[in-house]
Amino acid sequence: MIQMQGVYKTYRNGVTALNGLDIRIDQGEFVYIVGPSGAGKSTFTKLIYREEKPTTGTVIINDMNTSTLKQRRIPMLRRQIGVVYQDFRLLPTLTVYENVAFALEVIEEKPDNIRRRVMDVLDQVRLKNKARFLPDELSGGEQQRVSIARAIVNQPKVLIADEPTGNLDPDTSWEIMHILEEINEAGTTVLMATHSQEIVNTIRKRVIAIEDGMVVRDQSQGEYGYQM
């Protein structure tokens, strides 16, 4: 599903972000990516959706080698991957419905399919009744749920959640986690980068800890493992 072998990433400024990663993540797993700031977590996730390429090593996503992937095939890869950001990244002048529909419009999906699929995912994230609202009319948690709906509307095989609860209060964070668990239970692989000790220690999943660009711990049903 996701495989990295001997992956190194050194940026043009000489900073080495990843230092020999060897990781395999199978279809349907839920994995927390943890580690201190600057450890290489963001670079790790960027390699998956081909925002970055490894300096050396191999990255294979769904049988596609991203290192040798031709530019014209990158959109095909990204249609299989949804991304949820900490800061939501919603288009402020579009309604909830339009923000989610936009992800299907750019791949020229049929209008009937767009309507059906958008309403299905809004129902899944408990926002069907707010389809006509603008982002600034929603709470932070509701905006994050729109972001999740937009990320899964293409029915991706992989969902990357980059600090999805970082800007949210505790109660809202748990709501988001339950939605991510439901998405995972439906078969989507979920990778979640997080600094939340409470979430990782309560909802036990596989934990991959990255420090100084290296995997220092890979545990099934693991703990967060860092002092807050």
Image (spheres, grey):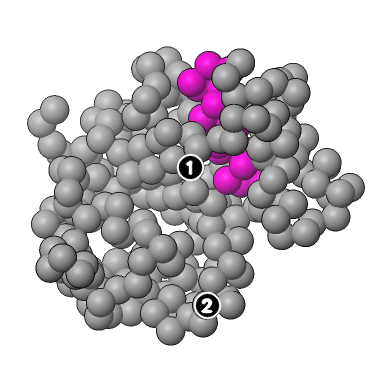
Q: Which mark is residue 71?
A: 2
The amino acid on which the numbered mark 1 sits, given as a three-letter code, is Val
Along the line of sight, the residue nearer the viewer: 107 or 161: 107
Q: Position of residue 200 (x, y in %)?
A: 30, 35
Q: Is residue 127 magenta?
A: no
The residue labelled by disc 1 is: 84
Magenta span: helix, strand or loop, mainly? helix
Q: Looking at the rendering, which quadrant does residue 3 occupy?
A: bottom left
Whether residue 176 is visible to the viewer of this picture, yes or no, is yes
Residue 197 place in picture, x, y as percent: 24, 30
With respect to residue 81, does 162 lie above or below? Answer: above
Compared with residue 37, is residue 104 higher up or lower down, i.e. above or below? below
Percent across and percent down for residue 179 are 54, 32
Residue 147 in the magenta stretch? The answer is: yes
* 208 left or right, relative to 66: left
- Image spot of residue 176 (x, y percent): 48, 28
- Determine crowd level at label 2: few under 14, some 14-19, many 20+ residues with C-alpha closer than 10 A: few
**Residue 201 shown left or right of residue 155 in the figure:** left
Q: Residue at x 42, y 33 (%)?
A: 87
Identify the magenta region.
138-153
The disc, 2 or 1, on the residue closer to the chain's N-terminal end is: 2
> Is the C terminus in the top left, top right, bottom left or bottom right quadrant?
top left
Few, some or many residues within 10 Å of mark 1 (<14, 14–19, 20+): many
Indicate which label's residue lies in the foreground, 2 or 1. Answer: 2
Q: Nearer the viewer, residue 89 or 205?
A: 89
